[in-house]
Image (spheres, helix red, strand yellow):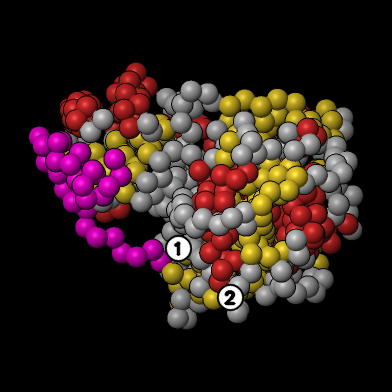
C-alpha cells in the first residue's frame, strides 16, 4: 500500500503547491504507516520534492503528455496507483485536480472528498475536514471505500520540510484515445493570478469607477499581489469577470487579502473566508466587512490607499 | 439535439448556514431553496441553444418531493421535460449513479451541469457521471459553441483559459462565463403557466451504496474583533502586517 499524489509543473518547474501537496501526502503516509509516491508531470528536477518527503517520484516524460487531457491524465494516475498499490490518491483542488479527481475516483471505485483543509482527523473510519457551503462551514466527511481520493484545498496545509532520500523513475504509459483536444491556451502573463497569489488586493464599488484602479494596481505591484474585485464591479464591466471574487466567482485562499471599498456582502465574504489575514478599508464603519476582517481602517480609499502605498514603499526600502 | 441539464436544489446564496442535531444536519429552517446558481448558468446556456439551433431540454434532479418547485422553475424558464429521481441525495457518487441511470435510459447528445453545487461543493457529480457512462468530460467550462456534433468548449485553468475541441455526446460542467449573470432569466407568467402542464416524471432510484458520509459540520471559529487602525496612521497598519500578522 502507498499514498500517491499528483503534481504538476510549469515549464518543468514545480509550483509551490507541489511542495505543499508533497508535505501533506508525506504526513498522510506517516499516519497510515506507509510511503509516499509522487506522480510528476515533465519535471526537470524531480529531486526537488525529496526535501518535502517524496520517497519515490514517478516522472512522466513522454511528449504525448505535455498537454493536459482529462481522460489521458486520469489514466496515468490510475496506472500509477495500480503499479504502486496506492490506497489513497491526493490531488490539489485546483483546475486540473478538480477535473481529474472524480474520473479517477470512479475508476478506482474510491470515495472522493474535495477541498480538504486538514490532515485526516482519523484513519479508521477515514475522516477528513473539508470546506462546504462555499466556505461558510466545514464538513467532516468519512470515506468508507477501501480506496480514497482526496482533493487538498490550496494553501490549507502549508509547506513543511521532511527530507528523505528519494528515488526517481521515469513513468510512461500508453496514451488512451480521447476525442477532446486542446486547441489553444491563453495565460494572463506578467501578472500574478488570484489562484496562486499570496496577497490579493481587491476593489469594490467604493472606488467609483474603472479609472480609479491605478492605485489598486500600484498597491498590488508593491506587494507582488494579484488584483481582484467584487461582483458589482465585474457586473458593471469595470473589471474583467476573471477578477470576480465570491461565491459565484473565484475563491481566494491567500495569506493576505486587502479589500478596498467593498462592503462585504455575505456572498463576497464566503469567497474570501479561506484567506488568512483580511484587511478592509472602507468609509462606512458599519460595513459588514469589518466583522470579518482582522484589520480595518475607516477612511476614504482615495486618501488611505496612496498613503499605504507610500508607507509600503518606505517599508520595502528599509527591509530590502 | 437532446440536452439533459442536471440540477441541484440548494439553499439560496444569502441563506444563513446553521446546523442542528448536534451539528450533524443542515438547518433548513427558514431557508429558501433555489436552482444551484452554477446549474442555472448551464440551463440558461441550454435554453439559448434551444432558441438558436433547436433542442429539447430535459432537467433532472435527485431528491424528494420538496425539490419539485425547483424543477418547475426550470420548466418555467424554458426546459421541456423534468425528471425527479425519487430518493434523498446521500453523496456525490450515489447522485452520479442515479444520473447515469437516467442518461443510459434516454438518448442525450449533451449533458450540462454546474461544476459544483453551492451547498456541499463536492465538485464531483459531473465528472463521475461522465466516467460512469463512458463519456468525454469537460470541467469548469466558461464558454461553449456547438456546430453539428462538433463542440468548442473553453475551460478555466489556473491563471487563464484553455480552448478545447470535442464532439457530442459529452458531459460539460460549467460555471459563470457559460452565460453571464445578466443573462439569467426570471420566469414570466406564461412560462409559469406552461410549466404546470409540462411533464414531470418521477422515477425510482437504482440502489447504490454511498462511498462517503457527511459525519458532522462545523462553523468557522468566531473571529476575534477587527483591530482598527486610524486612517491618519497607515504606518501602523504596515507595522502590524509585518510584526503581528507576519504576512509582509
Say whether residue A14 is left or right of residue A177: left
Q: Residues within 10 Å of mark 2 (few under 14, many from 20)?
A: some
**Residue drawn 58% across and 30% down?**
B160
Residue A235 versus residue B57: which sits nearer the camera? A235
Q: Residues within 10 Å of mark 1 (few under 14, many from 20)?
A: many
Name the residue furthest top: A211
Residue A123, numbered circle: 2
Q: Position of residue A20 (x, y in %)?
A: 51, 51
Q: Position of residue B138 (x, y in %)?
A: 73, 42
Q: From the image, which quarter does the C terminus of chain B lie in?
A: top left
Instruction: Find residue B208 and name its label.
Output: none
For label 1, the residue is: A137
The residue sitting at 85% across, 37% down in the picture is A179
Please report the residue visible at 19 percent of the width from the left and 30 percent of the height from the top: A318
Q: Visible in this render: residue B40?
A: no
B225 relative to A126 in the view: left or right: left
Q: Nearer the viewer, residue A24 or A148?
A: A24
Per the rendered image, the range of residues in magenta is B219-248
Q: Is residue B233 visible?
A: yes
Chain holding disc 2: A
Amino acid at each position: 500500500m502507498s499514498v500517491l499524489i499528483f503534481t504538476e509543473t510549469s515549464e518543468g518547474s514545480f509550483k509551490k503547491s507541489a511542495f505543499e501537496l508533497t508535505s501533506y501526502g508525506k504526513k498522510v503516509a506517516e499516519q497510515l504507516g506507509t510511503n509516499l509516491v509522487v506522480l510528476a508531470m515533465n519535471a526537470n528536477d524531480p529531486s526537488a520534492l525529496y526535501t518535502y518527503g517524496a520517497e519515490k517520484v514517478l516522472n512522466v516524460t513522454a511528449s504525448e503528455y505535455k498537454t493536459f487531457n482529462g481522460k489521458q491524465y486520469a489514466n496515468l494516475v490510475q496506472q500509477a496507483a495500480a503499479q504502486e498499490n496506492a490506497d489513497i490518491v491526493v490531488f490539489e483542488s485546483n483546475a486540473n485536480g478538480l477535473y481529474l479527481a472524480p474520473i479517477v475516483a470512479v475508476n478506482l471505485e474510491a470515495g472522493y472528498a474535495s477541498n480538504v483543509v486538514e490532515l485526516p482527523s482519523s484513519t479508521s473510519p477515514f475522516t477528513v475536514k473539508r470546506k462546504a457551503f462555499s466556505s461558510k462551514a466545514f464538513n467532516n466527511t468519512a470515506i468508507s471505500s477501501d480506496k480514497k481520493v482526496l482533493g487538498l484545498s490550496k494553501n490549507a496545509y502549508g509547506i513543511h520540510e521532511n527530507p528523505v532520500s528519494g528515488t526517481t523513475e521515469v513513468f510512461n504509459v500508453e496514451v488512451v484515445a480521447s476525442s477532446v483536444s486542446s486547441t489553444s491556451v491563453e495565460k494572463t502573463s506578467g501578472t500574478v493570478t488570484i489562484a496562486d497569489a499570496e496577497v490579493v488586493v481587491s476593489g469594490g464599488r467604493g472606488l467609483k469607477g474603472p479609472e480609479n484602479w491605478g492605485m489598486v494596481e500600484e498597491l498590488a505591484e508593491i506587494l507582488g499581489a494579484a488584483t481582484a474585485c467584487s461582483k458589482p464591479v465585474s457586473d458593471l464591466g469595470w473589471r474583467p469577470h476573471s477578477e470576480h471574487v465570491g461565491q459565484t466567482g473565484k475563491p481566494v485562499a491567500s495569506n493576505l487579502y486587502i479589500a478596498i471599498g467593498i462592503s462585504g456582502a455575505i456572498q463576497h465574504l464566503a469567497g474570501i473566508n479561506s484567506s488568512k489575514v483580511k484587511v478592509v478599508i472602507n468609509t462606512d464603519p458599519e460595513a459588514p466587512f469589518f466583522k470579518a476582517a482582522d484589520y480595518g481602517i475607516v477612511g476614504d480609499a482615495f486618501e488611505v490607499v496612496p498613503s499605504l502605498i507610500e508607507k509600503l514603499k518606505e517599508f520595502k526600502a528599509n527591509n530590502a | 439535439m437532446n440536452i439533459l441539464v442536471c440540477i441541484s436544489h440548494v439553499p439560496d446564496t444569502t441563506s444563513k448556514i446553521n446546523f442542528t442535531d448536534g451539528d450533524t444536519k443542515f438547518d433548513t429552517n427558514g431557508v429558501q431553496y433555489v436552482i444551484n446558481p452554477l446549474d442555472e448558468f448551464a440551463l440558461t446556456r441550454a435554453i439559448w441553444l434551444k432558441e438558436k439551433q433547436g433542442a429539447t431540454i430535459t432537467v433532472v434532479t435527485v431528491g424528494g418531493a420538496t425539490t419539485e418547485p425547483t424543477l418547475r422553475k426550470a420548466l418555467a424558464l424554458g426546459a421541456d421535460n423534468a425528471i425527479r429521481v425519487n430518493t434523498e441525495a446521500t453523496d456525490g457518487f450515489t447522485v452520479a449513479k442515479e444520473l447515469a441511470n437516467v442518461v443510459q435510459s434516454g438518448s442525450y447528445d449533451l449533458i450540462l451541469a454546474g461544476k459544483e453545487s453551492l451547498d456541499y461543493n463536492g465538485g464531483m457529480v459531473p465528472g463521475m457521471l461522465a466516467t460512469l457512462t463512458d463519456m468525454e468530460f469537460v470541467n469548469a467550462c466558461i464558454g461553449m459553441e456547438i456546430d453539428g456534433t462538433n463542440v468548442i468548449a473553453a475551460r478555466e485553468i489556473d491563471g487563464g483559459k484553455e480552448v478545447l475541441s470535442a464532439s457530442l455526446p459529452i458531459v460539460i460542467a460549467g460555471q459563470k462565463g457559460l452565460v453571464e449573470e445578466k443573462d439569467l432569466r426570471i420566469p414570466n407568467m406564461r412560462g409559469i403557466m406552461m410549466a404546470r402542464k409540462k411533464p414531470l416524471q418521477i422515477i425510482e432510484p437504482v440502489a447504490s451504496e454511498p462511498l462517503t458520509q457527511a459525519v458532522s459540520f462545523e462553523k468557522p471559529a468566531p473571529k476575534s474583533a477587527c483591530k482598527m487602525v486610524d486612517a491618519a496612521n497607515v504606518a501602523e497598519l504596515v507595522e502590524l502586517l509585518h510584526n503581528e500578522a507576519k504576512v509582509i
